[in-house]
Amino acid sequence: MNINIRDVYQHLNYLADLCGYGQLEADISFLTIKFDDLDQFRNVIKESEKMPNEIKDYLKLDELEASDEEWSLNFNKQGLFKNGIFFFVSESSFLSWLEDYTLFESSLLNRPGRKIILVKGLPELFIGPKLLLIPLNNSFKEIPNPPELHLPKSALIKEHIHFLGPNLEIEPSEFALSKYPENQIGHRLLEYSCKLLSLCLVQDVLSSNEIRVKGLKTLNLELMNSEMSFSELLSLHNNLIQVIRWVYEERVQTRLKLVSNRLSLDLLPSESLIFGLSKHLENAFEEAKEKYGFIIKDLSDEFDKEVRLLQTQIFDRAKNYGEKLRSLLASLLRDIIAAIFLVGFSVLSKSNNLDVTKFLTNEGIQILFRGLSIYFLASIALQVIFNISDILLTRAELFRFAKSTRSYLREDQIKKKINDLLGDREMMFGVLYFVITLCYLLMAYLCWNLKYVLPLVGIL
């Protein structure tokens, strides 16, 4: 069952207000309020009992403890937590949780969907694709749609970055916000976001704080080993988003390699990746874009050459279809002429006392025509077997040639080029080949059944 944030907002807000009357012990999954005053303790119990049952299912009063000097309430926040809602009754409790947060091991990262964090005292609403920080105040405001940062998905990152440590997985937009609060909370969230984004520009992630950059040199660096100011992190964050969008837009390996080549020369082994990127990323990006333009131009020229070479090979093979058709048609005409010549010669040899009816029904003539029928069948069968085998072999050789010489064309592009250029010719070849084959079969049938066919056409 999913929680509607509007349904729980007012009750959590009121509960947060009541918490101001007592001493707090809080974590992401529990909230304990301790009271020195019995009346305050009773008021909180009454207010908690007013919450609707569907809210109580998510925020449970686990136990109530009382003594002569101290009273406490323990609320279980697991129901909210399981539904992606995180509730903190003060900025200090939220910051305390952030300080203890482990970037790659926390279950927050492993939870699907958008995370909603409600914090009492937060100055305003902060929105991101995966994270929503909502202040608990007197009224609930409509939440606008999240900004579209156009960052790559985790699946695409895995295709190009090697994660060598256990439980290492990143979602670049996990902590990305359209703006950050300029306080300790915003500083910590910005730091986490920069860490995740920077991992999109390395080759190997060795552990939660160790990475490897492979460019013209190979460097093993710490992810972060020193504090940076809010302004430095914000500037780096904006640059990272811009560079990552460009790198993962197209030809990821080429673009990533160009950025890494420059960074591997500029970064120092004693520096952390985050600190080094804050100084050198902008220059590396400008150089990568400039070199990429030249590479694409060269690749385009080479691509065009490869396409022209493939087209030449296809046209050479395409001639084979015409040659096969001409050869088959010539064989058909030759066989027809040979059959006419054979019959004519037989007629002329007996022309002095020829009786056409007796001649055509003569047993010897019948054997002759049936032999001719067998010849027609054998002729077309051998030609079909040889020609079709030769066409298939030629097509297979064309694919092998294209694959062995290709550098820039993908296999699906090669197939499309071949099918586009040979498709119509193959269709015409198939239709005409079928018609000629039918002619052979018809002649074979007529010759074999001559004494039955002649009466039908009025000759006998």
Image (cartoon, rainbow, N blue to C red):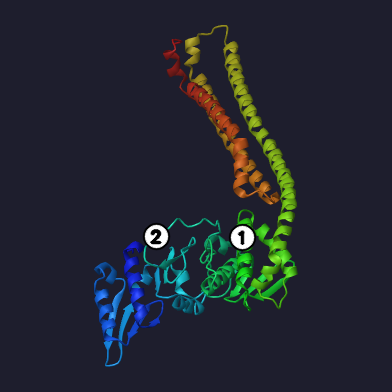
Q: Residue furthest top?
A: 352
Q: Is residue 291 left or right of residue 205?
A: right
Q: Is residue 380 left or right of residue 32?
A: right
Residue depicted at x 35% and y 70%: 13
Q: Position of residue 445 (x, y in %)?
A: 48, 24
Q: Height in image: 307 above or below 202?
A: above
Q: Residues within 10 Å of mark 1 (few under 14, many from 20)?
A: many
Are the residues at dot 2 and dot 1 in contact (C-beta closer than 8 Å)? Answer: no
Residue 141: assigned label: 2
Q: Is residue 456 left or right of residue 410?
A: left
Q: Height in image: 197 above or below 25?
A: above
Which picture quadrant has residue 249? bottom right
Viewer-proximal residue, 350 or 374?
374
Residue depicted at x 60% and y 71%: 230
Which picture quadrant has residue 240? bottom right
Label 1 SS? helix
Amino acid at the residue labelled 2: Lys
> How far apart, in angstroms, are the residues tagged by discs 2 and 1?
33 Å
Viewer-proximal residue, 281 or 10?
10
Residue depicted at x 72% and y 42%: 309
Q: Position of residue 61 (x, y in %)?
A: 28, 78
State the quadrant of the N terminus: bottom left
Amino acid at the residue labelled 1: Ile
State the quadrant of the C terminus: top left
Label 2 SS? loop
Q: Earlier in the sequence, mark 2 or mark 1?
A: 2
Q: Position of residue 21 (x, y in %)?
A: 34, 81
Reading the image, the residue beneath label 1 is 244
